[in-house]
Amino acid sequence: MQDLTHEILELIRLTSTDLPADVELRLKQALTEEEPGSAASEALETILKNVELSRLNSTPICQDTGTPIFYVHYPEGWSTRQLKSQIRAALAEATKRSFMRPNAVDAIYDKNSGNNLGGEDFPSIHFEEVDKDQPLTIQLILKGGGCENVGAQYSMPYNPLGAGRDLRGVRKVVLDAVYKAQGQGCAPGILGVAIGGDRGSSYIKSKEVLFEKMGTRNPDPNVTSLEERLTREANQLGIGPMGFGGKTTVLETKITGLHRLPASYFVSISYMCWAYRRRKMIVNGNQVSYE
């Protein structure tokens, strides 16, 4: 099994410093929809300038480089123990080189590890085995603390909003979460929504769906319709970029559904900030590519 530490280091550098083209394009489109000279327009112009400079200088897009969440799809026969060791070594080196800020803080003793490594749970690494002839893929998303803080989970029915256990109820609580976030999630944001599961799996799936590219829609037409409606209605709230008011509060909504127990109906919303930092590394033999 080859040592991919250097290649994983490059994955981390790209994720932290080079915003994906599809996200940058959506931000540029949002700028054209705001009033010239408005606070919303100026916020988006500043964001886009920051994106350009970060890419040019290989510096983090945001000072909060976020929680690293890795998803590894590995061919049968590969060692997950070795892959985990290489990911952790690459993350420590990325922190040393200032592609990442030291973020791993022991919650009990309030001590920063200094290298983004903390126990077995930081960074978060998920493994899934695939067929032997499939390529190795490593996906990374950096989830900032500000947008993580405004995530929400609702247990349905949610009586304060009259939200029942159906898609109409889901619409009510998702819009409620966006309204409560205001500008604190560093809008314009991307919403990852999971319907169903238990409390833990629902939150996990609401983040997993954020790995998909902009424009990816749920195959169920009823869910697709809700995704588009939520984005449209969230943008009618007037919160706008960074909470300064305007037409662009949410860039996109992504929804996934899970099976649940009859007794439970959870709706989990993971809010992603405008710094939608996600990348994929593909290893096919000796060839390595990044998306």
Image (cartoon, rainbow, N blue to C red):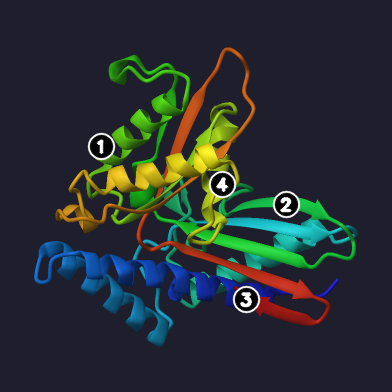
Secondary structure found at label 1:
helix
Three-letter amino acid code at the position of disc 1: Lys
Q: Which residue is mark 3?
A: 290
- Mark 3 crowd level (few <14, some 14–19, many ≥20, 10 Å Cα): some
Place residue 49 in its image quadrant.
bottom left
Residue 198 sits in quarter:
top right
Asked which secondary structure carries label 4, the reply is: loop
Disc 2 to disc 3: CB gap under 8 Å: no
- Crowding near the residue tagged with mark 1, few <14, some 14–19, many ≥20 C-alpha atoms within 10 Å: some
Residue name at image x 37 percent, y 67 percent: 26
Query: Disc 1 or disc 4, which is closer to the eye?
Result: 4
For marks 2 and 1, the one nearer the N-term is 2
Q: Can you identify the residue that label 4 sits on?
A: 218
Q: Earlier in the sequence, mark 1 or mark 4?
A: 1
Q: Specify which label sits upstream in the sequence, 4 or 2.
A: 2
Question: Mark number for residue 180?
Answer: 1
Of pointers 3 and 4, the one earlier in the residue sequence:
4
| Nearer the camera: disc 2 or disc 3 | 3
Q: Which mark is residue 127?
A: 2
Mark 2 belongs to which amino acid?
A: Phe
